[in-house]
Image: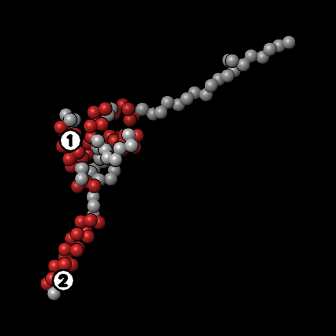
Amino acid sequence: MRVKLLAIVIMFILGTTLLNNNKTFAYPPFLKQTKDLGLEAKDCTYCHEKASGGKGWNKRGNWLKEQKKERKAQAVDVRWLKTYSEETTDKEPKKQEPKNDSANNTTSSN
């Protein structure tokens, strides 16, 4: 009876640990690496919306995710933050003005 109960408790603990696989467990080294780069990261809100990390990223975090896609990397590399700039993310894409061909169109009068 005790063996079955112990097995159930162990399975429950393993199950909840595996099901509650929160990515914040994997990323605290990012905070240390960021500080080691001389950046002013105080907590996870340097890239996340919440101090606890997890899903929900701010501009910097979204930029890192974009960099991961652009670089076709398997994981984010915090060293990329050395090239991050707030101005880069604030800029809107340039809108192309429609070409005005009326200046080039001339009508010939015969």
Q: Which residue is mark 2?
A: 4
Q: Residue furthest right?
A: 110
Circle 2: element type: helix
Q: Where residue 50 sits: x, y (%)?
A: 27, 50
Q: Which mark is residue 91?
A: none
Q: Which residue appears at 14% of the width and 84% of the height?
A: 2
Q: Toward which corner of the image does residue 21 lie, by quadrant?
A: bottom left
Which quadrant is the C terminus positioned in? Answer: top right
Q: Where residue 56 sits: x, y (%)?
A: 34, 50
Q: Where residue 15 sits: x, y (%)?
A: 26, 70
Callout 2 crowding tier (Cα within 10 Å): few <14, some 14–19, many ≥20: few
Q: Which residue appears at 21% of the width and 44% of the height?
A: 31
Q: Which mark is residue 33?
A: 1
Left or right relative to 97: residue 106: right
Q: Which residue appears at 23% of the width and 73% of the height?
A: 12
Q: Where residue 59 sits: x, y (%)?
A: 35, 41
Residue 50 at least partly seen: yes
The type of residue carrying mark 2 is Lys
Q: Is residue 21 above or below residue 110?
A: below
Q: Toward which corner of the image does residue 85 lie, by quadrant?
A: top left
Which quadrant is the N terminus positioned in? Answer: bottom left
Q: Toward which corner of the image does residue 7 lie, by quadrant?
A: bottom left
| Foreground of the two, 92 or 79 | 79
